Amino acid sequence: MAVHLWLAVVIISDVAASLLRPPRQLSPCQVVQNDVFCNDLNLRTIPNKLPHDIQKLDLSRNLLQNLTKEVLLFYTNIYHLNLHSNKIQFIQTGLFKDFTNLKVLDLSRNNLDIFAVLKYSIGPLKSVERLDLSGNGLYTGMTDYFLSEAPKLVNLSLNDNSITKVGKKTFCGSLALRNIDLHNNVILEIEDGAFDFLRYLSELDLSINSITCITDFNLSQLKVLNLSKNSMECFQTTDSDEEYELLYLDLRENKIHYFPVLPRRNKLMYLDLSRNRLMSVNTTGTEDELEYFRDTFVTHTRSHGTSRHQDLSRLMYLDMSYNQIQNIPQSFFCSMVSLEHLNISNNCIATFSVDQESPLNLLKTLDLSYNALQNLSFGENTLRSLQELFLQGNFLRIMDSGTFLRLPSIRGLHLQQNYINVCPLQPKPHQKDGKFQVPPGCVHLAFIPTLHFLYLSENSIEFLPPHAFSGTPLMLLDLSLNPGLEIQQNVFSGLETSLTHLSLRENHIPELNMDLSLLSSLKYVDLSTNKLTTLPFWNKESSIESLNLQNNSLVTLEYNTVLVLERSIKTLYMGSNPLNCCINPRLLDMLQRSDVVVPDIATVTCQYTDNSKLVEVNVTSVTQEQCQKMDSKSISVIVVVVTALVLIVVLVVICKLYHTRRHKSNSSFRA
Ligand SMILES: *[C@@H]1O[C@H](CO)[C@@H](O)[C@H](O)[C@H]1NC(C)=O
Ligand SMILES: *[C@@H]1O[C@H](CO)[C@@H](O)[C@H](O)[C@H]1NC(C)=O
Ligand SMILES: *[C@@H]1O[C@H](CO)[C@@H](O)[C@H](O)[C@H]1NC(C)=O
Ligand SMILES: *[C@@H]1O[C@H](CO)[C@@H](O)[C@H](O)[C@H]1NC(C)=O
Ligand SMILES: *[C@@H]1O[C@H](CO)[C@@H](O)[C@H](O)[C@H]1NC(C)=O
Ligand SMILES: *[C@@H]1O[C@H](CO)[C@@H](O)[C@H](O)[C@H]1NC(C)=O
Ligand SMILES: *[C@@H]1O[C@H](CO)[C@@H](O)[C@H](O)[C@H]1NC(C)=O
Ligand SMILES: *[C@@H]1O[C@H](CO)[C@@H](O)[C@H](O)[C@H]1NC(C)=O
Ligand SMILES: *[C@@H]1O[C@H](CO)[C@@H](O)[C@H](O)[C@H]1NC(C)=O
């Protein structure tokens, strides 16, 4: 009874409370604790019935035009005000003066250029730490109306405007700035000392502008500088012994001709020079300047003193892809003892060597793809950490056959589009003149115990010796696009338990004389665009999940092969083959089963002759009954043909007999 009474009281008080409570439903905004979300509501004014103690007010994507004291009166305690994507063109001067807690102010994507034209100032932004003015059509000088009194401002976004010049006084009123984002403007000029007052400046994004040259970089406190996608032709640091904090320098997609002159004492970790116009790794400048770098270099490393290259001992990432570099002297890498990632792809390098003087022993990834490499040499005890080596698209033909045996950590070798030949396991003397002749300059790919991924497509390989990969635990082997490739028995021996991916695509192979089921881990097999008329018998269990047999000359698959395949296969490509689906009903069943995906089912057709005409039907529409009908049809045809043949033979025999008799009787007659 007491419980009931208590419940009743609770219910009544609830109802009363809900009647007394301000009708929240009237405001279209969503209130979640202290945050109010009024975004995407086509609002033209700010709702005034919101709780007054809100922290965050999201008014983004509405139709607000004028920000005046009246509309924001109630919300002076706010911490985060988001006005992104409105039509704001007027802000009452001093509006935010009393907003003592406002830390984040997002005014991006509005029409503040209209406001700035009026030459009003937004007034003090005493507590704002993060200000977003991006996408407002602001041009040079206009930022002054927003930044003149922003002493706590740390992050400033001015990206996607039309600023052409960063003036000396631009940031005078915002001395606490750490991050400035100016990307996607049209900056042509930065006045001397424009960033000088900013003692805390650490990230500067000037990407996607029109800057042509920086000749006296002296922002030693800067950590991140992004100058990508400008029209930079040079980058030079002021000559100084000061230690620079710079960690990231992005100079991608410019027109730089010479390797940048970097701070002598630097901590640079990341340097992107890709898509420029470097023809060498020389820094610009006179012999004096080079002399000067030589001295620096000698004091910082123990190596020989002929090098003119800068000290980059902290550099971990260097990208110089898509330039016109023809030659990189080994001394260039001497100081780069921390380098992990080196990308020099898409240049014109003909020779590349790594030696003991610059062993690059922390390098993990080396990309030399799409150059003009003919000669490649790695010294002993170099590249001890190299895991991925990209050499595709070069002219590698003849090199030291042990080149890849000397890479103790190599996992992936990308050798496609070269002229590589694979050496036999051991070139035994008695085989030299015999059938295992190999062209000179082959490379050894056996007994590389760390190698898992090997790409050899498009190398014009015609011959692969037996046991070519034994002792190398390959998981992936790509031999595609080597037309005429002859695959000897035992080529894959040693890969029985490791190989999961095998591609023999476009090799013009007429016959595969090996049992793929011996490769017991094989899951993905690509045999497409060959000339296979049949698959070899598969006896053992297979683990093949995906098999591509597209574009061959297969009429059917062996009954046993289908039996073995059925158990593991999930995806089967079978299009563009002259299949006779009725020979093996099991195959037809597999192709039609819903648990086997046949991605190219639309091109899988079955052929049969009907009244001596070749008929092709869509495999999905072939039924077992049709096959039986066709069978019985063909049986009756066979019966007719056989009977006719027998009759003909009998007739001929009778004729012959008759003839001989006549002949005999004739001769006897003559006799
Ligand atoms: C905003 O202010 C301008 C000029 O002060 C005025 O013409 C315009 O009507 C105002 N817009 C709104 C929506 O109040
Ligand atoms: C400034 O921006 C950086 C990175 O964009 C961010 O990590 C940091 O928290 C921001 N600081 C403030 C105060 O908003
Ligand atoms: C950087 O160079 C400019 C122009 O030479 C100079 O005005 C400024 O004082 C220098 N700044 C520092 C921090 O050395
Ligand atoms: C530099 O800016 C470009 C374009 O704005 C951007 O894609 C790139 O990630 C930036 N680089 C770094 C190192 O942040
Ligand atoms: C780079 O410097 C070396 C040595 O001074 C010189 O032989 C070579 O011609 C220079 N390369 C270019 C492209 O300027
Ligand atoms: C090297 O640079 C090219 C072009 O910028 C890029 O496509 C490739 O993925 C890079 N290589 C590596 C290993 O990151
Ligand atoms: C490659 O090395 C061979 C032999 O050392 C040499 O004859 C040839 O000129 C070199 N090729 C290039 C492009 O450097
Ligand atoms: C099928 O193979 C032939 C040669 O065997 C080739 O010309 C054709 O491009 C291949 N078609 C497809 C779709 O791969
Ligand atoms: C074969 O059947 C499939 C599935 O019903 C269909 O998508 C495809 O267009 C057909 N192809 C031909 C050549 O009729």
Image: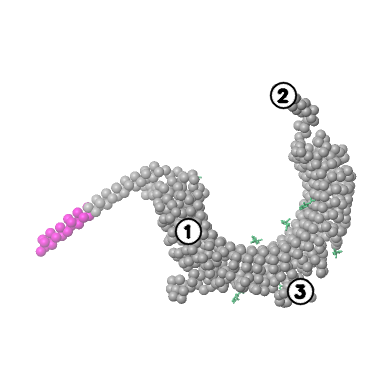
Q: Which residue is tagged 3?
A: 299
Tell me residue 446's x, y (percent).
52, 67
Q: Is residue 216 above or below residue 175?
A: below
What's the magenta region?
651-671
Q: Amino acid at mark 3?
A: Thr
Q: Which residue is tagged 1?
A: 519
Quadrant position of the C terminus in the picture: bottom left
Q: Which mark is residue 56?
A: none
Tell me residue 435's x, y (percent).
43, 71
Q: Note whether ligand 2 is within 8 Å of mark 2.
A: no
CB atoms of marks 1 and 3 within 8 Å: no
CB atoms of marks 1 and 2 within 8 Å: no
Q: Quadrant of residue 67?
A: top right
Secondary structure at numbered mark 2: helix
Q: Is residue 628 magenta?
A: no
The residue shown at (43%, 49%) is 587
Determine the CA span between mark 1 and mark 3. 56 Å
The residue shown at (74%, 70%) is 310
Q: Amino acid at mark 2?
A: Ala
Magenta region, main secondary structure: helix
**Residue situated furthest top in the rendering:** 1
Q: Quadrant of residue 202?
A: bottom right
Report if residue 461 is visible in the image: no
Report if residue 152 is visible in the image: yes
